[in-house]
Amino acid sequence: MSEALRVTINPANQRIDIRNLRYVGRWVEAFEAQRASFEEEIKEKVDRGELTVTTDSDDPKMDTPERAIHFMAHAAAENSMQRWAMLRGIGLPGDKIIDHGQEIIYELDPSVPPLEYQAVEA
């Protein structure tokens, strides 16, 4: 296991109901920004010849290069957003968790803005 990561979060983050519409709106906003960023990054790599996009004519999500890039960006953003929620302690009571082999230790501080975090390697 890698070294623990200490994360300072607002205690309200742990009480968030992930079905709360206000939270969902913030999550979707962050997700869409991540997806757009990944999409640009993928397009740049394709343009530079560093990445080849594979299409699949039988899959409407990947039947054109543009859709395949969007699909790849969507998958990358989903993974990124899982980490986004873990680092912020969203809906996760307790003082620590293990996420993909990474121990995350939560320290509560109401001065940290809600839905934000501050991380320092332990």
Image (cartoon, helix red, strand yellow):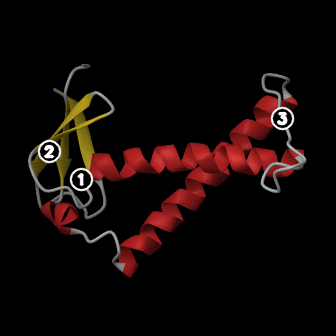
Residue drawn where x is 27% and y is 72% of the image = 17
Question: Taking 21 as reference, is 61 above or below it?
Answer: above
Q: Quadrant of the N terminus?
A: top left
Q: Position of residue 33 (x, y in %)?
A: 58, 57
Marked residue nearer the N-terminal end (1 or 2)? 1
For the C terminus, the image quarter is: top left
Which disc, if any, is residue 49? Answer: none
Q: CA distance from mark 1 to mark 2?
A: 7 Å
The tag on residue 106 is 2
Nearer-the-camera pick, 16 or 98: 98
Give the residue type that dot 2 points to: Tyr
Q: Which residue is mark 3?
A: 54
In the rendered structure, which amino acid carries the disc numbered 1?
Gly
Q: Amino acid at mark 3?
A: Thr
Please tell me whether residue 70 is drawn above or below residue 10 in the rendered image. above
Q: Tell which circle, 3 or 2, labels the residue nearer the N-terminal end.
A: 3
Is 42 left or right of 118, judged from the image as shown?
Answer: right
Q: Disc 1 versus disc 3: distance between alpha carbons?
A: 36 Å
Say above or below: 23 vs 3.
Answer: below
Q: Residues within 10 Å of mark 2 (few under 14, many from 20)?
A: many
- Residue 96 picture location, percent across and down: 13, 41
The quadrant in which residue 118 appears is top left
Which residue is disc 1 drawn over?
89
Marked residue nearer the N-terminal end (1 or 3): 3
Circles 1 and 2 in contact, beta carbons < 8 Å: yes
Quarter assignment of residue 112 = bottom left
Question: Disc 3 or disc 2, which is closer to the eye?
Answer: 3
